[in-house]
Image: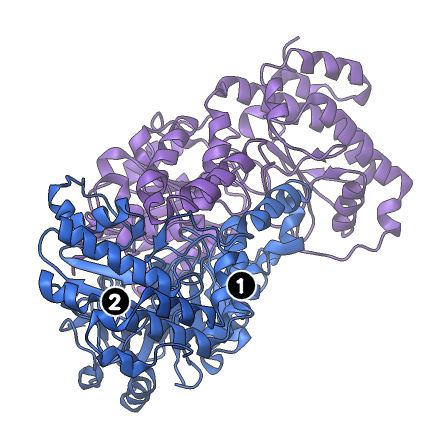
Chain colours: A blue, B purple
Amino acid sequence: LTFLSAHFAKVSTEMKYSLEMCREIDDRDKLGRFKQAFNLPSGIIYLDGNSLGALPGHTRQRIEKIIDDEWGKHLIDGWNVSWWQAPSRIGSMLARLIGAKSEEVIVTDTISVNLFKLIAYSMNLSPGRRVILSEGGNFPTDQYIAQGFAKLQPHIEHRTMPPGCIDPKPHFTSEVAVAILSHIDYRTGALRDMHAITARGREAGVHIIWDLAHSAGAYPVDLNGAHAEFAVGCTYKYLNGGPGSPAFIYVRKDLCELTEQPLAGWFGHADPFAFEEKYRPGSGLRRFLTGTHSALSLGALEAGMELWKEVDLEELRKKSISLTSLFIDLMRPIAERQKLSLITPIDPALRGSHVAYLCDDLGYNVIRALASRGVIADFRAPNLLRFGFASLYLSHQDVWHAVKHLSAVFDSGEFRESRFECRAITT
Amino acid sequence: LTFLSAHFAKVSTEMKYSLEMCREIDDRDKLGRFKQAFNLPSGIIYLDGNSLGALPGHTRQRIEKIIDDEWGKHLIDGWNVSWWQAPSRIGSMLARLIGAKSEEVIVTDTISVNLFKLIAYSMNLSPGRRVILSEGGNFPTDQYIAQGFAKLQPHIEHRTMPPGCIDPKPHFTSEVAVAILSHIDYRTGALRDMHAITARGREAGVHIIWDLAHSAGAYPVDLNGAHAEFAVGCTYKYLNGGPGSPAFIYVRKDLCELTEQPLAGWFGHADPFAFEEKYRPGSGLRRFLTGTHSALSLGALEAGMELWKEVDLEELRKKSISLTSLFIDLMRPIAERQKLSLITPIDPALRGSHVAYLCDDLGYNVIRALASRGVIADFRAPNLLRFGFASLYLSHQDVWHAVKHLSAVFDSGEFRESRFECRAITT
């Protein structure tokens, strides 16, 4: 036994697994040692690392150093000592996780802002084409930013594929300049075939911007292997950069100096401290920077990234499959009883690291009742239960206990009795 | 004696002032008590709070609370507990400092990104006009962002006024949709007449975006009094929000729901957690938000803003004038000897809270030699010495000592001997 292998997912009875068996698997888990690197509240099973990653134990120390030493003692000189290079420095730490070269990744702004930059940049590369393609049902900011961009240029059409369109290739017509695609769907967890779709995009002359929000740190992304051109991604989920930590941009090396992006702020200038009147884009990925970045938010991210240096990505993927497979299997009888429908691909090769079920209109109550038992998962309006499996700090025993709690929530009916106020929970 | 009054600036001999006199003034300084609220390194006189504000003593504690409690214990629920409302909550704290209503200010992104939003927004309000006006010699990001925006819409012209144009009104022609103007010039410290220029803008149909980077926390800005429409500003200078803390946006209440801005991210949506396909702008200032903000960077800013609750803005202005006047007077013989030319208005009513001199090509060395004596000031390429006076933590004695050190740097010639590597120092 190392991890549950993929074919276990086909076994359908809860009885197959015991807590003892989970413990044995955990004992052999090569990533198990990372759990102690996080400060998780005792008694909590956290299945929401795909919304906000847990707190690494050493993050506080790193932030204290920035505050007391870099800011407090060095004052303005902190920019020279540390902060100026942080977007590139952290980008290069991130590169390995997504299959990029170290100089192809930079950390800055938010996914929303970065998508805007890349839409504009890629449209510049295809002046004869007028369509931005995005997917219905994708995380809304990807749609909204495309809509916002299209309103600036009336000749541009923002076109949306039908929701659930896992294969976008038929939509790559000759009018399409750029397509924004999630690598792993934020709701279903379905994984797109990056290699095939990127290849088809290249043939069709369509630039693709991959949204790696639910991939980075959850799946060994291979941007270079797929010859992918552009990507954005999130660092506050699986990468544990802290609430609202900055996003990243990937641009394939041969494309990064071909044109400019319109959010042409001074940090992206070729020589920011020359105070020239005219914008000249910086070299490489620096031209995708805009304004002055927060040293604190980048610092917390850097602390989170340090843990990743020692993570074997193949082990990560194996464990992710093992955890999600175990969860799906244990959940099967509950799902049948409660009429929850699994919308995540049952084939582990086709999914990322979270699992989702459609439920009836009491879904929010289920998640809150579960939370009151110490199991934190996620509700997505209007009717989605979403469970994330961050392999660095979850064990198979955690999964086993989480399902037991969920079963008890349903069996006891406590979710029906509760009156939970519906509050926002962020992605 | 309370502070040196404005007419003291006309007195021209260094001998007029003694350290003893400075001490007496400081003893009566109503803002003097704030100095102990900052953790300034001992032996340092910090004349660069207009680049990066000093560290408030309680910031670290606030950040530790966010890390340990809000993130570490509440995990994803930290968004409900605290973070979601932070942009508006801190915006309302900031409003008094710039003469705005609490609902007219929101904290988000960077000045660069926010300028882009406001350019687009204000151009939407003037569909028949095609010119974005900005000022030559202004802080470069203001120019670059206007250039970047203009490239997206070929019919738009980005027009630049001559550098040093303190009165932009003659440039408000009927083609101009929007003008980006610094309230206080980042180099000279010259203060624009916001009331008169805003009034002229209104007559001419020109929307004005005021850049308050060097005003907020340095000068009692009166946006509502001037009937100003739009503004952006910086929080990491006089407001002490920390390196790269987020910027703010002001939009006059009657204008804030007239149209949309193009960086239409999910945090600006009317109902972000409804996951609608189509962007609907949020109410009030929320529509100027874009992506997920950093809880840490906003948290540090909130700590900085707490100090401002008790600051009397009239006292602030009086002290600012007193400090800059003292500095200019004490510097007069040195400036004459060393052929430094003061480019800051000598009339205190016409300047903000920093003072700048043009110098020869060894200016960078002067600033570094001064730093090695514990006096931190700022060099702006190619030939500007800039000295900022943050009234919350500087005293008249500090000014007196700083000038003594500067005098010694020149008299000893140590700045000529030194071989300082020219490193970037941020705004």
**Residue located 13% across and 57% down the image:** A383
Q: Where does the image place residue A305, in percent across and percent down from the top left?
A: 52, 62
Looking at the rendering, which quadrant does residue B413 occupy?
top right
Q: Which mark is residue A224?
A: none
Element under disc 2: strand
Judge the density around disc 2: few (<14), some (14-19), many (≥20) Cα neighbours within 10 Å: many
Q: Position of residue A213 (x, y in %)?
A: 35, 66
Q: Which residue is mark 1?
A: A307
- Relative to A168, is B46 on the left or the right? right
Secondary structure under the numbered disc 1 in the rendered image: helix
Q: Nearer the viewer, residue B278 or A195?
A: A195
How many labels sit on residues? 2
Between the residue at mark 2 and the residue at mark 1, the CA separation in whole angstroms equals 25 Å
The image quadrant of residue B96 is top left
Percent position of residue B346, x then y: 63, 28
Q: Label 2 belongs to which residue?
A: A355
Residue shown at 68%/16% (left/top)? B26
Q: Quadrant of the N terminus of chain B?
A: top right
Task: Name the chain under label 1.
Answer: A
Q: Disc 2 marks which amino acid?
A: Val
**Which of A131 and A85 lies nearest the eye of the viewer?**
A85
Q: Where in the figure is residue B20, as x and y percent of width and height?
A: 79, 14
| Kind of residue indicated by mark 1 | Leu
The disc, 2 or 1, on the residue closer to the chain's N-terminal end is: 1
Vertical side of B300 occupied by A427: above or below: below
Residue B418 relative to residue A311: left or right: right
